[in-house]
Image (tube, rainbow, N blue to C red):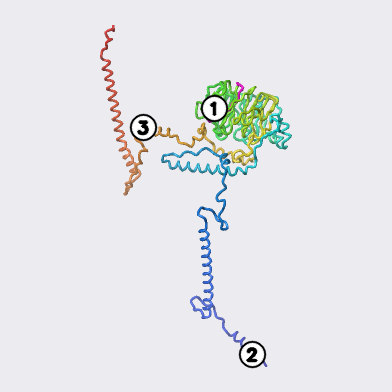
Amino acid sequence: MASPGEADVNASHVEGKGKKKQPPARYWQELPDKEKGENKDEGQVEQQQEEKKKKEQQQTQKAKKRKRDERPRDGKRVISGKSDPFPGPVPVPQDRMQKFKRNDNIRKTHRKHYKLKEIITRSADASDMAQKQAARFDILLPEDAGFLEGDEDEDTCTISQEDIADAVDITSGAKYFNLKLCQFGPYRLDYSRTGRHLLLGGRRGHVACLDWQSKQLMCEINVMESVNDVKWLHTEHMYAVAQKKWLYIYDSNGIELHCIRKFNDVLRMQFLPYHFLLATASATGFLQYLDVSVGKEVAAICTKTGRLDVMCQNPHNAVVHLGHTNGTVTLWSPNQKDALVKMLCHQGGVRSVAVDKTGTYMITSGMDKKMKVFDVRAFKPLRSYFLPAGASCLSLSQRGLLSAATGDVVQVYRDVWSTPVTKPYMAHRVRGSVWGLHFCPFEDVLGVGHGEGFTSMLVPGAGEPNFDGLDANPYRSAKQRQEWEVKALLEKIQPELITLDPTELGQIDQTTFEQKHQVRVDALGFDPLAKEKFVPKFKKKGRSSAGGVERRKKQVAHEDQRDVIRKTVEDRRKMEEERKKMEEKKGALSSKKSALERFRK
């Protein structure tokens, strides 16, 4: 018999089994009261959460507004509620700004050239920004130039090259060496723009190019005739050789690329890197320019001054300086057949000329045993030095050191244009008479070509310690060299832009503009800039066709010209009448008998 508790449990179980499960309510059916109450509670909770979020957003916006109101009006930022004690960018010292100062700002035109004014303003802003960035990043340049300093009562010119090579590190000491080439000397030389490669040309036909730092020979040939000069072109893979008769172009493997017979009897050469021009001076007195990018002759100028064996270029404006036997130095541009400037520098013939990289100073040496320093801006002499044997070769370094060769002695001077110099900075004696001097770019090295071969001297403080990686990078790879060559060709400067003052290129020649405008007014019979051009009114129903509009423009233009033409015709008629009257008057005077007629037989 079952207990009462068990009976209740079974009954409830039976009821649960018999009870049907309610299906879920649809959206069109009404919910029971209990479920409605639960949904109401959930809706209230969601509404409270939304109100809470709104309150938090309002508080955040109020806090931001309060911070914005507390910010000072002068633009200082607020850091942790305090004003910045050093607002704005870091100021650049003025002395450092002067180091990178470019030319003065271009004057804006007074006429209504709005587009030109905008271009000038944009260019000036870009120049100022470049100057500030260069001055700001100057502190990041790690290298600095150093000079040779002796002990007390010791002259630096008495220190030998062997002592300097022993005192410096192994890498720098290896840059002092001698090449004994007695058979084909004396030698002319040239360094590439990056300073890595050396080109040698012997008087008796020996030509060699090498990587002088690693002592790796690139090529070595003998052209079987005399060599007057050698010069690297835009890269270290091409060079020009001025041989006895014609000008030749070779590659770095010694293969002859071109024989240019228009350039004959060449004695000296200069390469303009930003114009891709090879300037040559010949024994016949001709100055010729060759565009190496297209292989065409740009200009051939007859200087009418005889043999040209003294030549240099101004790196600042690409003007060529020539020295002559009558003691004058002339400045030349491919745009003019006459010399830009003629300067009387010496009482005897000029032996050598050199110009610094800023284009400010020119140093000359002559047969009168004097070495003079000139200011190219004013064409006036600044200093004059007397050398007992005279200077046959001159060369200027990137830092302003001057090397002068007298016989077999090479002397290096420092600050020759700022202060009077009484003794040389360094001196060295080579094995033969010096025939060529050249400072290596970005290195404290002076290359000397002489009768017994080549000598590489150590000259502390000669080279620029920091190089521009986008212009002349000594450590560039083959890919970087190819990219640089393409960009340099795209940015090539035309030879028409070579002038004495490069700053004139950004200015307007107002006098020439007025002359051209007057010629145009005389040709047209009216001033086209006197008033605004006539703009025909637009007509409907197809009456504003292109032909109709042009016809109306011409009609108005003809009406404007009629008065001018009438006036011109009237002036011509009056002049013709005056001329006829003068002829009649002369005829009447000639028909009258003079008092001397009675003496005629």
Which residue in the protein does label 3 denote?
Answer: 522
Examine the structure image and report whether residue 409 is included in the region drawn in magenta.
no
Please report the residue visible at 41 percent of the width from the left and 39 percent of the height from the top: 111
Furthest-front residue in this view: 152
Residue 166, given in percent of the width and then of the height, sits at 74, 34
Disc 1 residue crowd, few under 14, some 14–19, many 20+, Cα 10 Å: few
Kindly identify the amino acid type of the residue bearing the numbered disc 1. Lys
Q: In the picture, residue 367 is in which quadrant?
A: top right
Furthest-bottom residue in this view: 1
Between label 2 and label 1, give the one nearer the viewer: 1
Residue 145 or residue 596, whichever sits in front = 145
Q: CA distance from mark 3 to mark 2?
A: 132 Å
Q: CA distance from mark 2 to mark 1?
A: 134 Å
Which residue in the protein does label 1 denote?
Answer: 380
Q: In the picture, residue 158 is in which quadrant?
A: top right
Which residue in the protein does label 2 denote?
Answer: 7
Looking at the image, is mark 3 or mark 2 earlier in the sequence? 2
The answer, for residue 326, to whether it is visible in the render is yes
Magenta part of the chain: 367-380
Please report the residue visible at 57 percent of the width from the left and 39 percent of the height from the top: 99
Q: Quadrant of the N terminus?
A: bottom right
Residue 412 or residue 456, whichever sits in front = 412
Residue 177 or residue 33, whichever sits in front = 177
Disc 2 residue crowd, few under 14, some 14–19, many 20+, Cα 10 Å: few
